[in-house]
């Protein structure tokens, strides 16, 4: 499953930054990354009758940190890890947030990942 592959890759590439699917564990140490699958579709292509079919999964990766500088540095390390990953992926864009309720900075990164299951 692509979610497990992504988590394993990030754990290796960024061993000091915890990575969580959907929601961080309570009391997690900042910075950390939370990812969630936004959309997944199977692309059938004519070449080879789509066998095996390739999947396109959009993944949202959120970097959470107490300072803007730390959030940006962690996001840069995440971008570098995604670029080095052997799975084809495309950064669709990024956005910065400040979450007043939890007093944390968040960088949202949106990726399109092409993979076989």
Image: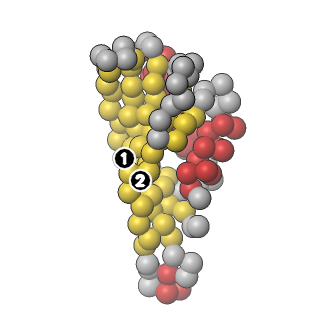
Q: Is residue 84 above or below residue 64?
A: below
Q: Is residue 96 above or below residue 42?
A: above
**Which residue has dot 1 on it?**
92
- Quadrant where the image shows the C terminus: bottom right
Q: Which residue is located at x 38 percent, y 34 percent?
A: 108
Which numbered disc flags the more N-terminal residue, 2 or 1? 2
20 left or right, relative to 61:
right
Determine which quarter of the picture holds residue 81: top right
Looking at this view, name the residue that lies furthest to the front. 26
* Nearer-the-camera pick, 113 or 104: 104
**Which residue has dot 2 on it?**
58
Check disc 2 and report its element: helix, strand or loop. Answer: strand
* Residue 77: x %, y % from top left: 55, 30
Coloring applied to the structure? secondary structure
85 left or right, relative to 104:
right
| Residue count near mark 2 (Cα–Cα under 10 Å), binned few <14, some 14–19, many ≥20 | many
Label number found at residue 111: none
Q: Is residue 13 above or below residue 51?
A: above
| Residue count near mark 1 (Cα–Cα under 10 Å), binned few <14, some 14–19, many ≥20 | few
Q: How many marks?
A: 2
- Quadrant where the image shows the N terminus: bottom right
Q: Which residue is located at x 45 percent, y 14 percent?
A: 66
Q: Nearer the viewer, mark 2 or mark 1?
A: 2
Q: Which residue is located at x 36 percent, y 14 percent?
A: 103
93 left or right, relative to 3:
left
Q: Are marks 2 and 1 in contact (CB under 8 Å)?
A: yes
* Nearer-the-camera pick, 16 or 100: 100
């Amino acid at each position: 499953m692509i979610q497990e592959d992504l988590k394993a890759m990030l754990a290796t590439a960024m061993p000091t930054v915890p990575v969580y699917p959907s929601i961080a564990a309570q009391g997690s140490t900042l910075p950390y990354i939370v990812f969630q699958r936004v959309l997944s579709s199977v692309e059938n292509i004519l070449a080879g009758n789509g066998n095996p079919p390739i999947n396109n999964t959009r993944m949202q990766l959120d970097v959470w940190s107490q300072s803007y500088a730390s959030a940006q540095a962690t996001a840069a390390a995440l971008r570098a890890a995604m670029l080095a990953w052997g799975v084809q992926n495309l950064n669709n864009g990024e956005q910065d947030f400040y979450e007043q309720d939890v007093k944390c900075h968040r960088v949202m990164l949106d990726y399109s990942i092409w993979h076989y299951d």
